[in-house]
Amino acid sequence: MKNYKFNILKYILVFLIFQLCLNIGCNKTQLVENQGKSLQTSAYTTAQETKTIQETDKIQETKTTSTATEGTTTEGTTNNVNNTKKTEEEMQVKMKIESPSFKNNDTIPSKYTCDGEDINPPLKIAGVPKNTVSLVLIVEDPDAPGKTWVHWTVWNIDPKTTEIAENSVPVGAIQGITDFGFAGYGGPCPPSGTHRYFFKLYAIDTLINLSSSATAKDIQKAIEGHILDSAELVGLYSRK
């Protein structure tokens, strides 16, 4: 009877020990699984953080590229605007002198020569620089024998002048001595062949302090270093 009870207790003890071993093994397995899950979760979190950092870097790179592009575009636009302004200024500064009576390198009507009324032809002026103080007009014939023949000199012309009517002198302007020996206009009168007559207009930054006895050489010396712009009109003439 005692042996029987002892055997039962032994079996119960063995069973309990067996159950205990099973529980310990299960707990270890679960612990390993939990540790594995924790490592997976940690790895996933690290991957997400890395992805977020990469995306942030891409955004910053995109912003930097965009800023650089905008800077280049702005610089290009600014350069274009500046170039346009320079072109407009150059176009405005380019001065012109024309005549409604003859075109450049065309024949001067005899009315304005020694064969006609011998009066100055009408002239039109445009594109005078904004900072011009006065205009100077010199008419000369480089084809005259022996020297360049001066036909007309006028200075201290108002820079606002846009035309000089025929047989007239701008108000306030001064006429100088020509190679005809008097002050005022002397028309083309070539001894032979066809001559060229240059109507030279100068925009200067000062007034000329010369009397009406001044010659073309005096005027040219006075305007040295003061010329802002110049223009010319060429007329042709030959006597029949």
Image (cartoon, rainbow, N blue to C red):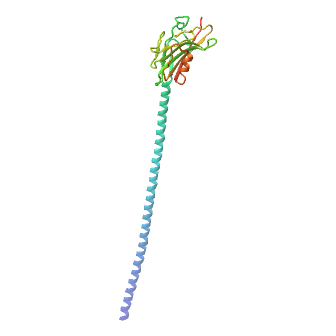
- Considering depth in this image, is 164 or 14 the residue closer to the camera? 164
In the rendered image, which quarter is residue 12 located in? bottom left
Q: Most extreme residue toward the right, as rendered?
A: 146
- Give above or below for 47 relative to 93: below
Name the spot of residue 155 as percent of width and height, x first: 50, 17
Name the spot of residue 201 as percent of width and height, x first: 52, 18
Badge count: 0
- Give above or below for 120 relative to 22: above
Give the quadrant of the N terminus: bottom left
Name the spot of residue 56 as percent of width and height, x first: 44, 53
Q: Most extreme residue toward the bottom, as rendered?
A: 1
Looking at the image, which residue is at 57% across and 17% down?
217
In the drawing, does residue 20 fall left or right of residue 166? left
Give the quadrant of the C terminus: top right
- Give above or below for 49 relative to 62: below
- Considering depth in this image, is 9 or 182 the residue closer to the camera? 182
- Considering depth in this image, is 38 or 183 the residue closer to the camera? 183
Looking at the image, which residue is at 41% across and 72% down?
31
Name the spot of residue 208 as percent of width and height, x first: 50, 19
Looking at the image, which residue is at 48% across and 27% down?
89
